[in-house]
Image (spheres, rainbow, N blue to C red):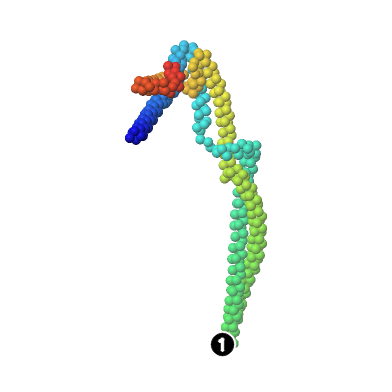
Amino acid sequence: MGFFKRLFSKKQSKELEQQSQETSEDYLLKQQTEQRQVGHYVLDHCEQIIEAARELGEEKKEYDIVTSYLQDIELLTDLEEEQKAPIRDAAENICKLNQARDLYLNTSKKLSDAQYHMMERMEADIPDAIRRLQTNETYQATVRRDMSYLEGEKMQWTLLRSELIHEKYVLKIASYVAFSLYFLLMFGLFIMQIGFEIDATWGWLIVTAIATAVGFFIFIRYQNAQTGIVRSEMNANHAISLLNKTKIKYVNITNAVDYAYEKYHVKNARELEYQWDQYLEAVREKERYMRTNDELAFYNKKLVNLLGAYQMYDARVWIDQPIALINPHEMSEIKHQLLVRRQKLRARIQYNANVVETERSQIDRLMEMHPEYEDEIREIIKSVDRLSIGEL
């Protein structure tokens, strides 16, 4: 019995020890989990503080800049009239030069960049090219007119030859008809004289005379037609010869003109001359633009030096808004805009300052709720404590 009692006692002791160990481990695990949750909360609040502090720093810097600009405006407004005069004069010159430059930049280009660079590249050759192209176009038009005239001449002589050939054919048929009719009449008169014993002497004479006249007329017309055909062929051949020579000239001059069109990317000499005039105007405008830039740089520097003499925060900013130095209304508008910006910055600064204060209060509350983790919490927020919120 004693043996079983001791055995049971040992077994019960081990079970109690095991339960105690398990309870201790659960407690430690729970404690570690709770510690991690607290650390996580603290880190979240610290991140909020860091972000708000960063925003706060940037906003206070911007606030100081806006305040400096407002102080510059107050300084400019309080200047004496003799102090404002040279500043106003420089600002007026800057405004005029800016307007001239903007006019140049906003003027629609009458030449494309490719056309401008082509003219620039061939600048020395363009005047001669214009005169040469004008001469070639005039000669081309003359040759074209000559071709039209010679084409008409060729057609006229060809048509005349065709008409004369047709006339020869008609005369030939007419001669056959007249000859046949003559023999028929002569045969009839012969029958009348032999068969009916009628005196046909006058008939013979009249028929012979008419036949002779008709034959002579047909012969003369036939010869004239033959001569006309020969002359028409000669004239037509001459016109064709001249036309062929003229066509060669036309082809050559047309090739020269087309090559010039392709080379300068134009449709005619008038367009090339127009582009040349626009190029010269663009060159003059560019030269004026360059002079304007030089003068603008001079007056910008002068304005900065004049304003810099009064120890302004940013004298160069007035280069971009010189009209405000001339027009009090414009200066009032800029001042109003700066005041609105500063008011909004002040509201944002207050908001982020409240965020920092709220998040820090949350951390302090966590330390009060969990004093056993105070050392760990203070270790976590040590980096945040290095941020000097007061200096921000």
Identify which amino acid the numbered label 1 is placed on: Phe
Viewport quadrant of the C terminus: top left
Question: Which residue sits at x=46%, y=19%?
Answer: 386
Residue 310 is left or right of residue 146, and the answer is: left
Residue 47 is left or right of residue 269, and the answer is: left
Viewport quadrant of the N terminus: top left
Question: Which residue sits at x=52%, y=31%?
Answer: 105
The quadrant holding residue 147 is bottom right
Position in image of residue 186 (x %, y %): 60, 81
| Secondary element at tag 1 | loop
Position in image of residue 34 (x %, y %): 37, 28
* Nearer to me, 1 or 263: 1
Tally the marks.
Answer: 1
Taking the view exactly as shown, the residue that stands out farthest to the bottom is 195
* Nearer to me, 341 or 385: 385
Question: Which residue sits at x=46%, y=14%?
Answer: 75
Query: Does 73 sit above or below residue 258?
Result: above
Residue 87 is left or right of residue 348, and the answer is: right
Whether residue 203 is visible, yes or no, is no
The quadrant holding residue 41 is top left
Question: Which residue sits at x=56%, y=36%?
Answer: 278
Kindly identify which residue carries mark 1. 196
* Nearer to me, 340 or 230: 340
Whether residue 101 is visible, yes or no, is yes
Position in image of residue 319 (x %, y %): 50, 22
How dense is the environment of label 1, judged by Cα within 10 Å: few (below 14), some, or many (20 and up)? few
Position in image of residue 142 (x %, y %): 62, 49
